[in-house]
Amino acid sequence: MAKYIQPSGITKRISPHSLRHTFATQKAEKGVSTYQLQEWLGHANLNTTQVYIHLAKQSGGKVMEQTSL
């Protein structure tokens, strides 16, 4: 994994799980459906995938607060 992290310029300590988590959260924020995420992540239970949707909604709320008039 180090051979990919170093050239990318990532300076934080990361793991395969954190990359997967970031991928899923970003896709959810961009509007990818829960069912598509479930398929990509290989989750048997849709509730597992919905965690990422919840995180994306929280993030969107923060953006709304930061940009409100």
Image (spheres, grey):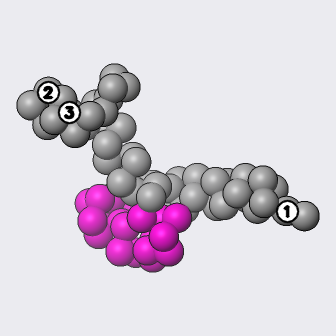
Nearer to the camera, 41 or 11: 11
> Label 2: how many residues lie within 10 Å, few (<14), some (14-19) or many (20+)?
few
Label whose residue precedes the other's in the sequence (1 or 3): 3
The answer to whether residue 5 of the structure is visible from this angle is yes
Helix, strand or loop for disc 2: helix
Which residue is at a point 31% across and 38% down the rendered structure image? Answer: 17
Name the quarter where the C terminus is drawn. Answer: bottom right
Name the outermost residue toward the right.
69
Distance between mark 2 and mark 1 Cα atoms = 41 Å
Helix, strand or loop for disc 3: helix
Tell me where residue 31 appears, x and y as whole percent.
50, 74
Helix, strand or loop for disc 1: loop
Distance between mark 1 and mark 3 Cα atoms = 36 Å
Which residue is at a point 31% across and 43% down the rendered structure image? Answer: 19
- What kind of secondary structure does the magenta stretch mostly adopt? helix
Q: Which residue carries the number 3 mark?
A: 5
Residue type pointed to by label 1: Ser
The answer to whether residue 49 of the structure is visible from this angle is no
Name the outermost residue toward the top.
13
- Residue 46: in magenta span: yes
Which residue is at a point 20% across and 33% down the rendered structure image? Answer: 5
Tell me where residue 30 appears, x and y as whole percent.
48, 70
Name the quarter where the N terminus is drawn. Answer: top left
Residue type pointed to by label 3: Ile
**Depicted 68 relative to depicted 15: above or below:** below
Q: Which residue carries the number 1 mark?
A: 68
Residue 2: mark: 2
Q: Is residue 43 left or right of residue 2?
A: right
Residue type pointed to by label 2: Ala
**Depicted 6 relative to depicted 53: above or below:** above
First to last magenta residue range? 27-47
Q: Do the residues labelled 1 and 3 touch (CB within 8 Å)?
A: no
